[in-house]
Amino acid sequence: MAAARKTLVTGLLTLVLGLVLWLFGSDEQVLVFTPSKLGVVLMVVGGLEAGYGLYRSRRDDGAAHG
């Protein structure tokens, strides 16, 4: 269950980092990337990873009780 929790926490941190970039990085441009667009990508990836971590933790809990 520790791996599922680690995946969930990593996904949530990535989601929050993406949110910060999306909110506060709209005026800057680094090389070819705009931080706000990179923030949207990180939010999507973080949300998917957090969802997968939640799924794994629920599945592991169900297997342990069933």
Image (tube, grey):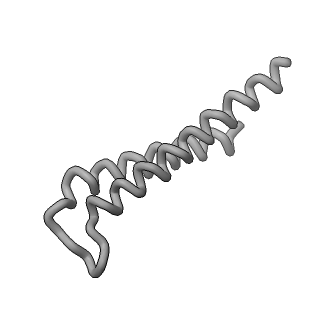
Position of 1 with respect to 11 (left or right) is right
| Total marks in image | 0
Asked which quadrant contains residue 8, the reply is top right
User: Which residue sits at x=36%, y=46%?
Assistant: 16
Residue furthest to the left in view is 27
Judge whether 32 appears above or below 1 on screen. Answer: below
Residue furthest to the right in view is 66
Q: Quadrant of the C terminus?
A: top right
Front residue of this view, candidates 18 and 6? 18
Position of 25 with respect to 61 (left or right) is left
Position of 16 with respect to 59 (left or right) is left
Asked which quadrant contains residue 31, the reply is bottom left
User: Which residue sits at x=41%, y=57%?
Assistant: 41
Q: Where does the image place residue 32, in percent across and percent down from the top left?
A: 30, 78
User: Which residue sits at x=56%, y=47%?
Assistant: 49
Q: Quadrant of the N terminus?
A: top right
Judge whether 28 appears above or below 46 on screen. Answer: below
